[in-house]
Amino acid sequence: MAHVSDLIATDIEAYLHQHERKGLLRFITCGSVDDGKSTVIGRLLYESKMLFEDQVAAIEADSKKFGTQGGEIDFALLVDGLAAEREQGITIDVAYRFFSTDRRKFIVADTPGHEQYTRNMITGASTADAAVILIDARKGVLTQTRRHSYLVSLIGIRNVALAINKMDLVDFSEATFRAIEADYRAFAARIGLENITAIPLSGLRGDNMVERSARTPWYKGPTLMEFLETTEVDEDRLQGEPFRLPVQWVNRPNLDFRGYCGVVTAGVVRPGDRVRVLPSGRESTVTRLVTPTGDLPEAVAGQSVTMTLADEVDISRGDVIATADAPPEVADQFECTVVWMADEPLLPGRPYLLKIGARTVSATVTDAKHKVNINTMEHLATKALALNEIGVCNIAIDRPIAFDPYRANKDTGGFILIDRMTNNTVGAGMIHFALRRSHNIHLQHLDIDKRARAQLKGQHPVVLWFTGLSGAGKSTIANLVEKRLHALGRHSYLLDGDNVRHGLNKDLGFTEADRVENIRRVAEVAKLMVDAGLIVLTAFISPFRSERALARSLLGENEFVEIHVDTPLDVAESRDVKGLYKKARRGELRNFTGIDSPYEPPEQPDLRVNTVETTPEQAAELVIEKLRGLGLLDP
Amino acid sequence: MKLTHLQRLEAESIHIMREVIAESDNPVMLYSVGKDSAVMLHLARKAFYPSVPPFPLLHVDTTWKFRAMYEMRERMAREMGMQLLVYQNPEAAKLGINPFDHGSQIHTDMWKTQGLKQALDLHGFDAAFGGARRDEEKSRAKERIFSFRSAQHRWDPKLQRPELWRLYNGRKHKGESMRVFPLSNWTELDIWQYIHLEQIPIVPLYFAAERPVVDRDGTLIMVDDERMRLKPGEVPMMKKVRFRTLGCYPLSGAIESSADTLVAIIQEMLLARTSERQGRMIDHDTAASMEKKKQEGYF
């Protein structure tokens, strides 16, 4: 792969010395095939001489066969090789390509296609130091250009090359170039993009790609390659920020060694530095930076290290070690921007897993504030986020974490959301700031606790969670169970639609989002009642597994008994005590479970009662037996 | 201090390995004895030092590797102090599958693809490191670093998860698994430069030496043991050759070369005119062959 350097043949050692010590820039290209994006990437690969002769020969042959350049090399073919796969129905989201010059190695994230564009571009851009935004000189700044630029600014890329391409088709007109540049800069300032380098380009002819073009004598700036070789690498900048190390893994080969492993995501660290561990707040001093070939005198942003500390501090995966002078904040509620990446919408109130650094916690969106129209940057009111939508939300997590605002540090401020059931990555988020209430509300330590209250009542507090279709018999059975418990001298409370929907939850309707919130509130109330020492019976359809899993997760071991009141739809419908099924069938009632809204039956309930084969009285007896079996009715 | 591209690649690979160890129950490293495996093993040592890497090495053996590769395998496992698991598909052994009678496709499928699946099932591994790189082949350019596999080891494009920042999602249900590629962002040149810089031991077959070979339609095949079937009149000749990629010896093409030092190899590669995978016969099928193999469970 003939790198141009003469050193290869004459002094390979000198060549290696130079090339083993060059930097790395990751960048993303934004634009469509119409802007000549593939041609520009293809030419960068070609000009950097990263192609082997068999690859060039293949391209030359393909150019004659399929090319659009009249037999000349069609550079676009170098990167459009995935077309065949597209035809096979294989999704291409982000393709990564590699080339290098004497000064740098490059990783290009290329996001082909228009479908799923937001999700793909955000993914490709999340690791990029710079962006190349392509514009067709004949068309100027389009909606698409604004959309790409907004996403680039959102993900926090600081350096942008505005490649005004196809200059050969506008006779290399300076006036055209300047007009587009001015237009773009005015827009970019509004979305907070500052470092913009506009370059007049012809990917097809090669003007200002690598060599300064004689056809643009009026242009004094860098060529595209010069821009890529000199623009700032984000990790170099991050060395100037306060030190951060999210702990990935604790290395304990024997009792005498305890090393904390992770990537330095910002700053510089040296033995002797004072550090603070978060969220605990304990402090210690760095003693060693350990490697197999000897200890390091310092480590900088971007390096993976193993660190030891002077004191025995309890540190586990997910904690953050930071400089004691400027530690990150600790909070459990945030305002953030969320990009949604799944077919199923994001629903406020539904529990997701949130992974930030090396920590995974349970999270719910408490409030969707607005979504953004990415073409116009308009804010629109919303309750949920659909695939490829971007919104600003409040998020609450189940325990405090250390974080930095995303714009200060992508690694301690960026997170992904994971669906608890499918385990898929469904969203990406960027923290703006902690909510003030998060700072001010501290859990009050109480002397009289759950155990004390339960002891006074002489019972085991527990939630009996009845789930099933409308008309399955949940309330009837729960009512009978409560009577039995009462007779046994137990303190109990039955939560059902009647006493909750008319009061606490009267602001909620029956959309999927409202149903999720309904159940979340019921689960929280049930938790408080268990805390008060009660046996709580809840009788709600609670159709989604996620929310039932949330309820379970709020409670302790042996404090949650899931009872599936299992009645086939046709049986429940034929009973139709309240006449609701008829209404739903007539279309007068929307989002009715079993008709036009799904019911996800429990996979492993603690108890399943079949109401076709058993009477309500027998079912109630089964529940009591189950409680006895679990030891929950023991004195 | 500005980090070099190799330092950044190294840091990324180490980060990936540590994430896998933290998020999986029963990880394993697939070790193929080639140069990429050598780099991966070296990185594992760095990632977990002073501990021994907390997972075993698994060699899915075809019984047709070069003898020098078997020697290297034993030596590296010993020096690293790691457990080495060798798996040979018993069905392929029973049927006597070999590259001469069955061709490269059946040979690879039976020994490697099926063998790998059987070995992973046998030990219940839920995460397996592989040394594949995105620059190796067009269809790999979009491969994830954490590649998700169903309980049947199938690669389903719809199940692949977006990977943002340094955040990898290693969560899975019972029976499902991950193939993880810590070298995704390395190129062939990066691998060689790193081997040079870190003085990583590699199989001697990469260096030019006098070796007995036969010329099969322009491809030089080394006669590594007595199982090599010679065609009538074919006589092995001694030539100074080396290998750019290693696999089963009857399926690996050698190139004539005098490069017998690491620096000379890199110099020769930089001046070379054909890409690395040309010598690997397994890719010579259709363009989308790698994609298909992947869906079937080949690494």
Image (cartoon, helix red, strand yellow):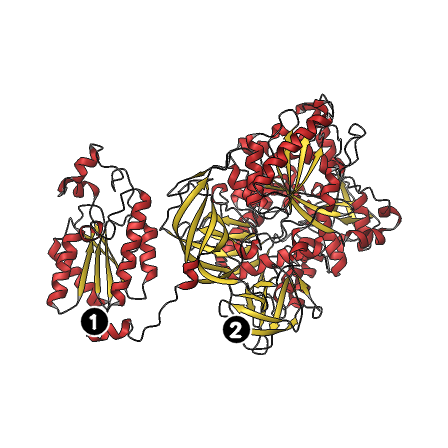
Q: Residue at x 23, y 75 (%)?
A: A455
- State which quadrant residue A188 falls in: top right
Direction from residue B114 to residue B222 in the image, left or right: right
Q: Residue at x 64, y 49 (%)?
A: B185
Q: Residue at x 52, y 42 (%)?
A: B295
Please give the label number shown on residue A312. Answer: none
Nearer to me, B133 or A178: A178
Residue matched to label 1? A459
Direction from residue A278 to residue A198 in the image, left or right: right
Q: Position of residue A574 (x, y in %)?
A: 14, 40
Q: Position of residue A418 (x, y in %)?
A: 44, 51
- The secondary structure type at the circle numbered 2 is loop
Examine the rendered structure and indicate whether residue A180 appears above or below residue B157. above
Dot 2 or dot 1, earlier in sequence = 2
Examine the rendered structure and indicate whether residue A72 appears above or below residue A557. above
Q: Of tags 2 and 1, which is closer to the observer? A: 2
Amino acid on which disc 1 is placed: Gln
Nearer to me, B83 or A628: A628
Residue matched to label 2? A282
How dense is the environment of label 1, judged by Cα within 10 Å: few (below 14), some, or many (20 and up)?
many
How dense is the environment of label 2, judged by Cα within 10 Å: few (below 14), some, or many (20 and up)?
some
